[in-house]
Each structure stands twice: as structure tokens, then as C-alpha cells.
Image: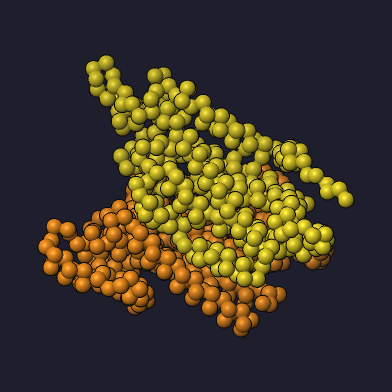
């Protein structure tokens, strides 16, 4: 018996062809990834350098000009360079924490849903407990416990709470899939549990997992920005969130050129992610598609 | 039904106990454990020992744990390291401050989201629908502290329409809850945080209402209602909306979770003296009794409100039999 192979690349192309908005989102995401890679070479200034004029006076809060395309901060740092370099930490956190959270959540959901009984009971009670925790306060406390704050401690804290959503959704999907005849058949044929889970169940819920992967990226980016904004981030790492913290803590809210760019970058990145999420959601849940 | 309630009740109690135990462990792991923070190593040995006894830190860990659990549930939450205030008295006010902001925000977001969702579904595919979708997606994707800062810049600093933060004009303080909340000054300060929160939470109920309305609009009984010659308004709000409403209620508990966790940044931007700001300030000041109690209170609120939502849902939808 030949198992039909799902062509992953082709599947993505179909999803994006069907939804033009999602293609725009995907292009923006790719563009931001590109920027993050080349930012050290295209940033016009050292983002940490206090720029001074000829007389040695710090160029404080200069509005956008030819010299500084997006103006300067309170300490005379170039906003554009900070935005460009800040892309790196923001994206790194989003993708790594988002991936780990979705991976952990998906596996908890798969194991819990497939094995059922005691395993399910224990894993779902743990999920219930994690659902009882307030999101940002939990991350704050975890980051403080592992202080001084580093990028990886913040990432770990985000992963430890973000996996819960994926776990619940994947579990309920596995519960319905495992009752299908072809799963019973492969069990009769002597397929091992792991083989059934990862070869027969996972391909069927992959679009769903991708939905939650993209959503987890968005949640991780927002969480990281929030934690940085509250001042619990790593003070030596630039991110869009830490720029907003600087603006707020240093009372620079009137300097629109300083705080609108990082905020807008965050919105655009997250909007793009959500648009892609919705395209995958329509694909994962064909009912949504026909309702349009 | 009765079995379901008992089962949910037991698991709710279990989750509360587990979260509280986790909290105890977490705050034991905080660097510079409470002993070194409260008790200066500069004191002589006898004084140190007395202080340890005073705080109950000389007892074995499991006794400390039991004391902690007991004290939490009888609202003996200790004194703030920072201001020496009684923590439970302080959090009582903080809770009402958060509640006054968040309950309004959730109710408004649900209400406006349902109406918006109904209208968007009715006009689906047209420019009104796309406009609404783009709008809510923007506010959903924008971190709430950035929206807040934008509002502050435009409406407070540039136009001077609203205060830049806090809950009252400085100096205006009332001892009673009624005096705190029932005045124009409070509402004036409430406007911007409420607006930011509503816009942020709006998308979820709106999108769910929209898709469940689209499903309802395609059903046979609506075709029948239209054939009867009922007006559009009547069809929309009397017939379709009632059936589309149920999924929106399920997200009530989700919204509560977001609101309890998400108000931290919101309260920081507007210096709103609620639980979220208390939590942030306590952590900054290494004020662990306050941080711990605030965290515990938030967690219990989330768990209990989720439990209540489940029960309400169970009563509302007679099809669900557990």
C-alpha cells in the first residue's frame, strides 16, 4: 500500500495563492528577516554611540533630518540604527521562543490525546495549572528568578507559559483523529505508537500546528516587547520593546520620531503574522473556507 | 449536570492549591532569599535569630509552607517590605481599581464586538466588512502600551483633552470606594485606559461573532424567516444573533485571562494604581510579600472566573450534557 505523500512546499504555495493578503504578510515577514540579517552592514551609525556636534555637544532629541533619517534619542543615539539592530533580538526571540512553545505544546497535545487515560489526565491537569497563571506576571517572576535578565532566560520564561494554548488545541484534534479507521488499521499492521503519532497523525494536523506556530511567534514577540517595556529586559540588548522602554522611562513621549517607529514596526510584523495565521486557519479548517 | 459541577469544582480547587504551591516554590527561588533581604547580615547573631523567629523562617520548610497556605486563605498577607503597609488592605484597593477599569473594558468590548460582528457579517465582502476587519486586526496586533502611548501623545500632550495618567487629580483622595469611583474626575482619567483596552480586546469577540453569524445566516430557518417577510433588523438581531451568541460567551473566560495578565503594561503606561502596577512596582522594589500576594490574587481570580464562565455556559446551552 502506498501512502500518499503530502508535498509540503506545494501546500504552502496553494495557501498563499488563495489568499493575497497572506502573501503580502509573508513578503513583509521575509523582508524583516532579511533586514535583521543585514542590519549590521546597513545601519548608518553605531546604535549605542552618543552622537555629538562639532562643539562636542550631544545631539539630543533631534527630529528627522538628512543626517539622522529618523532623528535621535535623548542621548543622541540614531533611531534608525536602533530600529535596524533591534530587529535581530525581536525576531530571534519571536522565532526561537515561538517555535519551542509550539513544539512543546504540540507534543504535549499529541501524547496526551493519543495515549489518553492517566497520561492524558496528568498532562491536562498540568495544562490547567498553567492556564491559571497570569501571563505577564508569570514571565516577570520567572525572569527575576533567573536574574540577571538575559535573552535566553526571557525566552525560557515565555516558552514555559505560551505552550499551553497549542497543547489544548492539538489534543482535542488528536482525540478526533485517532478514532479514524486508518489509525486502527495501522495499529493492526503493527505500527508502533511513535510511528502512528508522527507518521500518521502529525501530517493531518500540520496546518493546525503551523497556525499555532505563527500565533506563538506573535505572542512571543508581544511578550518580549512587554517585558522589555516594563524594564525587565536585558539592558545590553536592543529590541523594539527596549526602545519603547527608553522612550517611556526617559519621558521622550513627545519625540514622535523616537517612539512611533519601534511601535509601528511591532504592529506591522504582528499584523503580517496574524494575516498568515488566518490563511492557515482557513486551510486547516475547511469549514471557514466555504463560509466565505 | 450535577456531576459535572462537582467535577469542575474539585479540579478548580486542585488547580488553586497547585498554583499557590508553585508560587511558594517560585518565591523561594528568588535570588537573595527573603532572609538576607529583611534581615541585615550586619546585625549580631542573637538579633538575627530573633528576627528569623519573628518571621517564622527558623521553622522547617514544610511548616513554612503550611503556614503560608493558611495565611493566604485567611488574608494574612503580611506587610510590605517597602512601605510597611498591610498587603491585604493595600491589594483590596488595588483590586477595585483594576476591576473598575477591566470590567468596563470587557463588557464594552463584548458588546461592541457583538454588534460589530453582526454588522460585518451582514455586509460581508463589502468595504464596511473589510474596513472593520483591518481596523480590529490593527488594534489586536499593536502592543497595548504602544496604543496607549499614541493616545497619550495625541490626546493628552498635543490636544490636552485627557490627563496623562493616574486615577485622580493629585490631592484628590477618598477613603470610601464610592467616593473614589463616583465622580467626574475619575471618569475623565478612566477614558484613555478604557479606550485602549476596549480597542485591544475588541477583535476576539468581533471575529468570532462575525464567523458564527455567517454560519447562522446561511441556515434554513433564516431563509424561512426571510420568506415570512420579516425585516432585516428583526432577522439579524432576533433570529440570527441569538444563535450566534453562544460561541462568544466561551471567549469570556479567555478575555478575563488576558485582562488579568494584560493589564500590567496598560496600568504601567497610564500609571493606573491597580494590581498590575502593584506587581511591577513590587518586583522593582524587591518587595516580595506584595509581589507574591498580587500574583496569587490574580491567579485565583483567573481560575475562579473561568470556573464561573464554565458553569454559566453549561446553563445557557442545554445541548451540553456532561
Q: Nearer the viewer, residue B76 or A194?
A: A194
Q: Would you identify the image quadrant in which residue A11 lies? A: top right
Q: How many marks?
A: 0
Where in the figure is residue B31, as x and y percent of width and height? 31, 55
Where in the figure is residue A262, as x and y percent of width and height? 45, 36
Q: Nearer the viewer, residue B53 or B198?
A: B53
Where in the figure is residue B98, as x and y percent of width and height? 39, 62
Residue furthest to the top in view is A54
The residue that appears at 66% across and 58% down in the rendered structure is A110
The residue that appears at 47% across and 50% down in the rendered structure is A156
Q: Is residue A226 visible?
A: no
Q: Would you identify the image quadrant in which residue A179 lies? A: bottom right
Residue A82 relative to residue A121: left or right: left
Residue B38 relative to residue A196: left or right: left
Residue furthest to the bottom in view is B2
What's the colour of chain A in the image? yellow
Q: Is residue A285 above or below residue A42?
A: below
Q: Nearer the viewer, residue A163 or B216?
A: A163
Residue B72 relative to residue A110: left or right: left
What's the colour of chain B in the image? orange
Residue A181 relative to residue B77: left or right: right
Q: Nearer the viewer, residue B241 or A132?
A: A132
Residue furthest to the right in view is A1
The residue that appears at 42% across and 65% down in the rendered structure is B22
The residue that appears at 43% across and 57% down in the rendered structure is A138
Where in the figure is residue A12, as x and y percent of width and height? 72, 40
Q: Is residue B18 visible?
A: yes
How is this picture coloured? by chain
Amino acid at each position: 500500500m502506498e501512502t500518499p505523500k503530502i508535498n509540503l512546499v506545494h501546500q504552502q504555495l496553494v495557501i498563499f495563492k488563495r489568499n493575497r493578503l497572506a502573501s503580502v504578510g509573508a513578503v513583509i515577514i521575509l523582508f524583516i528577516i532579511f533586514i535583521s540579517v543585514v542590519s549590521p552592514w546597513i545601519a548608518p551609525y553605531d546604535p549605542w554611540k552618543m552622537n555629538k556636534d562639532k562643539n562636542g555637544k550631544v545631539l539630543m532629541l533631534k527630529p528627522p533630518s538628512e543626517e539622522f533619517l529618523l532623528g535621535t534619542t535623548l542621548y543622541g543615539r540614531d533611531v534608525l540604527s536602533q530600529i535596524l539592530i533591534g530587529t535581530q533580538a525581536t525576531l530571534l526571540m519571536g522565532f526561537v521562543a515561538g517555535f519551542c512553545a509550539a513544539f512543546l505544546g504540540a507534543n504535549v497535545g499529541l501524547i496526551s490525546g493519543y495515549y489518553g487515560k492517566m497520561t492524558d489526565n496528568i498532562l491536562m491537569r498540568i495544562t490547567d495549572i498553567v492556564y491559571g497563571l497570569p501571563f505577564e506576571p508569570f514571565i516577570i517572576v520567572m525572569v527575576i528568578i533567573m536574574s540577571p535578565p538575559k535573552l535566553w532566560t526571557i525566552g525560557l520564561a515565555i516558552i514555559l507559559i505560551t505552550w499551553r494554548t497549542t497543547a489544548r488545541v492539538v489534543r482535542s484534534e488528536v482525540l478526533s483523529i485517532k478514532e479514524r479507521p486508518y489509525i486502527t488499521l495501522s495499529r493492526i499492521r503493527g505500527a508502533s505508537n511513535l510511528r502512528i503519532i508522527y507518521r500518521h497523525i502529525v501530517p493531518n494536523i500540520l496546518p493546525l500546528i503551523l497556525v499555532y506556530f505563527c500565533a506563538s511567534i506573535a505572542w512571543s514577540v508581544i511578550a518580549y516587547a512587554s517585558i522589555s517595556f516594563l524594564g525587565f529586559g536585558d539592558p545590553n540588548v536592543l529590541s523594539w520593546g527596549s526602545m519603547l522602554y527608553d522612550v517611556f522611562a526617559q519621558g521622550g513621549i513627545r519625540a514622535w520620531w523616537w517612539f512611533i517607529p519601534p511601535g509601528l514596526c511591532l504592529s506591522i510584523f504582528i499584523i503580517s503574522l496574524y494575516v498568515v495565521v488566518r490563511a492557515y486557519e482557513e486551510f486547516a479548517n475547511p469549514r471557514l473556507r466555504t463560509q466565505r | 449536570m450535577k456531576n459535572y459541577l462537582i467535577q469542575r469544582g474539585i479540579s478548580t480547587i486542585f488547580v488553586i492549591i497547585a498554583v499557590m504551591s508553585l508560587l511558594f516554590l517560585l518565591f523561594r527561588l528568588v535570588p537573595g532569599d527573603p532572609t538576607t533581604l529583611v534581615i541585615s547580615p550586619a546585625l549580631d547573631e542573637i538579633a538575627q535569630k530573633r528576627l528569623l523567629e519573628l518571621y517564622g523562617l527558623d521553622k522547617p520548610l514544610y511548616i513554612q509552607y503550611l503556614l503560608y497556605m493558611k495565611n493566604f486563605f485567611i488574608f494574612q498577607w503580611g506587610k510590605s517590605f517597602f512601605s510597611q503597609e498591610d498587603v491585604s488592605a493595600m491589594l483590596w484597593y488595588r483590586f477595585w481599581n483594576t476591576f473598575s477599569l477591566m470590567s468596563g473594558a470587557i463588557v464594552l468590548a463584548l458588546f461592541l464586538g457583538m454588534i460589530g460582528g453582526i454588522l460585518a457579517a451582514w455586509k460581508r465582502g463589502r468595504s464596511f466588512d473589510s474596513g472593520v476587519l483591518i481596523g480590529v486586526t490593527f488594534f489586536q496586533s499593536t502592543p497595548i502600551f504602544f496604543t496607549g502611548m499614541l493616545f497619550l501623545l495625541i490626546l493628552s500632550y498635543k490636544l490636552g483633552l485627557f490627563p496623562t495618567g493616574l486615577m485622580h487629580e493629585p490631592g484628590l483622595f477618598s477613603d470610601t470606594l464610592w467616593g473614589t469611583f463616583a465622580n467626574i474626575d475619575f471618569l475623565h482619567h478612566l477614558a484613555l485606559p478604557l479606550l485602549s483596552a476596549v480597542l485591544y480586546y475588541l477583535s476576539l469577540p468581533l471575529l468570532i461573532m462575525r464567523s458564527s453569524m455567517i454560519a447562522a445566516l446561511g441556515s434554513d430557518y433564516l431563509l424561512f424567516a426571510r420568506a415570512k417577510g420579516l425585516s432585516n433588523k428583526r432577522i439579524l438581531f432576533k433570529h440570527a444573533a441569538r444563535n450566534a451568541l453562544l460561541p462568544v460567551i466561551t471567549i469570556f473566560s479567555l478575555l478575563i485571562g488576558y485582562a488579568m495578565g494584560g493589564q500590567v503594561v496598560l496600568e504601567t503606561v497610564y500609571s493606573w494604581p491597580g494590581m498590575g502596577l502593584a506587581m511591577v512596582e513590587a518586583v522593582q522594589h524587591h518587595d516580595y510579600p506584595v509581589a507574591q500576594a498580587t500574583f496569587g490574587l490574580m491567579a485565583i481570580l483567573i481560575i475562579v472566573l473561568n470556573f464561573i464562565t464554565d458553569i454559566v455556559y453549561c446553563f445557557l446551552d442545554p445541548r451540553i450534557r456532561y
